[in-house]
Image (tube, rainbow, N blue to C red):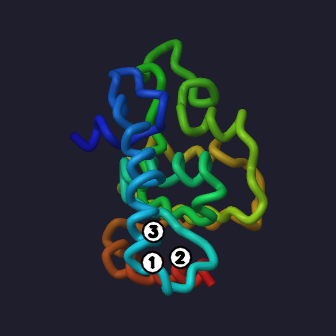
Amino acid sequence: MRRAEYGTAGVPDYMGQGQLAERYTQFIIQELLPYLQQRYPTFPLTRRAFAGWSLGGLSALDIVWRYPSFFQLAGIFSGSLWWRSKPLGADYRDDRDRIMHQLIRVGNFHPGQQFFFECGTADETADRNMTLLPGKRPWLNFYNFSSSFRNQVVGHRCADVKTMLG
């Protein structure tokens, strides 16, 4: 079920996965956030973060990128940035066929947003080309750890994301 609900909203991958991602996004925006605001009205909130691992990381990036008025921070842990519009093959090109990469290339960055990326060296090695956002960005943090070190580090990285919340 997660391959149906997670992904890039409105843009399923080449196998049709992510066809429910827009519904998941709308649940977060229209149901979950209002519920949390009602349930915890006195909770001091200056900025909101959305984070996830794997496909959840892809969804977090997509949701934060598309809804800057709701979320200012994204935590993408081993995000499934391989999500693509066509299978790997002779006519496949990273610069054209990676869905989230394209959405960011044609979209607009919103000042005040920050993105935190973490990945392990044992993750999908085809995704280590860093074509998502070339060049240095003060709002982008990227960490790359060996998988054996990852379990020790994830808690520290979560603390780094919490520190970004201010």
Q: Secondary structure at mark 3?
A: strand
Residue at x-position 55% and y-position 38%: 100
Kindly indicate whether the residue at mark 1 contacts the one at mark 2 (C-beta within 8 angstroms): yes
Q: For marks 2 and 1, give the CA distance.
A: 5 Å
Kindly indicate whether the residue at mark 2 contacts the one at mark 3 (C-beta within 8 angstroms): no
Counting from the top left corner in percent of width and height, residue 133 is at 69, 48
Label 1 crowd (10 A; few <14 / some 14-19 / many >=20): some
In which quadrant of the rendered image does the N terminus lie? top left
Q: Amino acid at mark 3?
A: Phe
Residue at x-position 44% and y-position 17%: 89
Counting from the top left corner in percent of width and height, residue 127 is at 49, 44
Badge nearest the viewer, 3 or 2: 2
Horizontally, residue 4 falls left or right of residue 58, namely: left
Q: Secondary structure at mark 2?
A: helix
Counting from the top left corner in percent of width and height, residue 148 is at 31, 71
Task: Tell me the residue that label 1 is attached to.
Answer: 158
Counting from the top left corner in percent of width and height, residue 69 is at 65, 57
Task: Tell me the residue that label 2 is attached to.
Answer: 161
Q: Please tell me whether residue 136 is drawn above or below residue 148 in the rendered image.
A: above
Query: Camera-side residue: 66 or 124?
Result: 66
Task: Tell me the residue that label 3 is attached to.
Answer: 145
Q: Earlier in the sequence, mark 1 or mark 3?
A: 3
State the image quarter where residue 111 is shown.
bottom right
Q: For marks 1 and 3, give the CA distance.
A: 14 Å
